[in-house]
Image (spheres, rainbow, N blue to C red):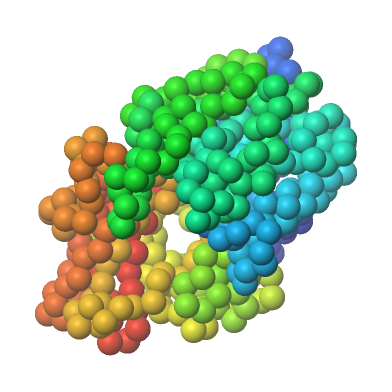
Amino acid sequence: MIPSRRDLLRLSLAATAAAPLAASPPARGQGRPAGAAPASPILFLHGNGDHAALWLTTLWRFEGNGWPRELLHALNFPDPLARDDDAVPQPGRSSSAEQTDFLAGQVREVRARTGAERVALVANSRGGNVIRDYVTRVEGAAAQVSHAVLCGTPNRGVYDWPEIRNREFNSNSDLLRRLNGGETDVVPGTAFLTLRSDGNDLFAQPRAVWSPATPDRPTGTDAAGPELRGATSVVLPGLDHREVAYHPRAFAEIFAFVAGRAPERLSVVPEARPVLDGLVTGTPGGAQNNRPVEGAAVEVFRTDPETSARIGEALHRRTTGADGRWGPVAVAPDWTLEFVLAAPGSPVTHFYRSPFPRSSAVVHLRPARPLTDADRAAGGVLLMTRPRGYFGVPRDAVLLDGRTPPEIPRGIARASVATLRLPAAELGRPVAALFNEERVVARAWPAAENRIAVAELTG
């Protein structure tokens, strides 16, 4: 039986009453293993420019291993991009102190709502800076944090270049000199774990391979840069900067460290009738922020997994209010979907997605980037995106419309977007985007109508 809209709204509101914290509606029929220690709240922090939706599969895996859904919270930092100089205000960007203050408020809220004395904090990349600053600078914070897991955090910086000395990621910045200036990098009473790659992390490299202008310039760091003195350190060979947080192998380490036991499964356990919800974020022009967008029209369609053609009428339509929320909508765990997002001042974006096996309230939507002159010269544009990792060739099998996208470099995994431009005569035909075991079929839309398509990978 498909839940009524009133039921869906009740489920969504219950899951998101603590916004901007995000969790999915309460799980049903999942007990904890006999003898397991009581679960504590876990707050998941994303990285620079990212958002809470990157933790989607991690949340699902925790739920499938008995962790109560209401204790899993993925945060959306309002302005997730770091400033060019941490001490100088910059529109649309945040300082390290602002990030820490935001986290402090979220921890207070979760502890008050759940009655928990302590919480666990898990972060990717820049989010780890926030955890370290929080437990060392905010009075009483360390006593409230049982576990701190830092995944790919550039704890020794990304570079040591003097011309950008006080950027947060500079090893000589005020923040990192303070955090790294003691005899140890951890605090008593909080268990620390770092997860890092063995050499495939784009931002833990001895040379600036991520810089198109100066790829051979020394950075002053290396593959061990994400480690902390005094912490448990685990190396995950071959994984990239994001995968050390979002990959199943990373989940296994995170879960075991926080739960004190190995997970029973790494696969995602499907639900009979997932309920999806989330926020529309960003400002006109493709800004990378997590501020809600009002007046965005969202449609959700079921699609044919082989042709991407729509099946029937829209499952859901809604125009966002001030909170930016676009759902909820009930789906089946094996349905492929198309989300159509028309946000003020942005291209109409058609997102094609693999099935959602479980409920989630962090299916966040950001409009795609503005169309370029090259895009407008084509009939239509289709982006292949991988939010939870990079494309690594030859490590991964990556095919877009039958070939490996030429803009994906070989070697260190560093690209997460590939672009396909099609002539007008080919619009409407199915285009397959393949990444290892995942296959998303999409189609391009007329660029002349200011539309852009995105084949967004879940894995």
Q: Nearer the viewer, residue 325 or 150?
A: 150
Q: In which quarter of the image is residue 155?
A: top right
Please say whether residue 121 is visible from this viewpoint: no
Question: Does residue 280 lie above or below 412 as drawn?
Answer: below
Q: Residue at x 49, y 44 (%)?
A: 160
Question: Does residue 167 lie above or below 26 as drawn?
Answer: below
Q: Is residue 242 left or right of residue 86?
A: left
Q: Position of residue 143 (x, y in %)?
A: 84, 29
Question: Does residue 356 lie above or below 427 as drawn?
Answer: above
Please say whether residue 146 is visible from this viewpoint: yes
Q: Is residue 109 left or right of residue 385?
A: right
Q: Quadrant of residue 149?
A: top right
Q: Residue at x 36, y 30 (%)?
A: 199
Q: Where is residue 354 in the image (x, y as percent from the top left)?
A: 37, 51
Q: Which of 243 and 154 is in front in this view?
A: 154
Q: Quadrant of the C terminus?
A: top left
Q: Give the total number of marks visible in the rendering.
A: 0
Q: Where is residue 347 in the image (x, y as percent from the top left)?
A: 41, 79
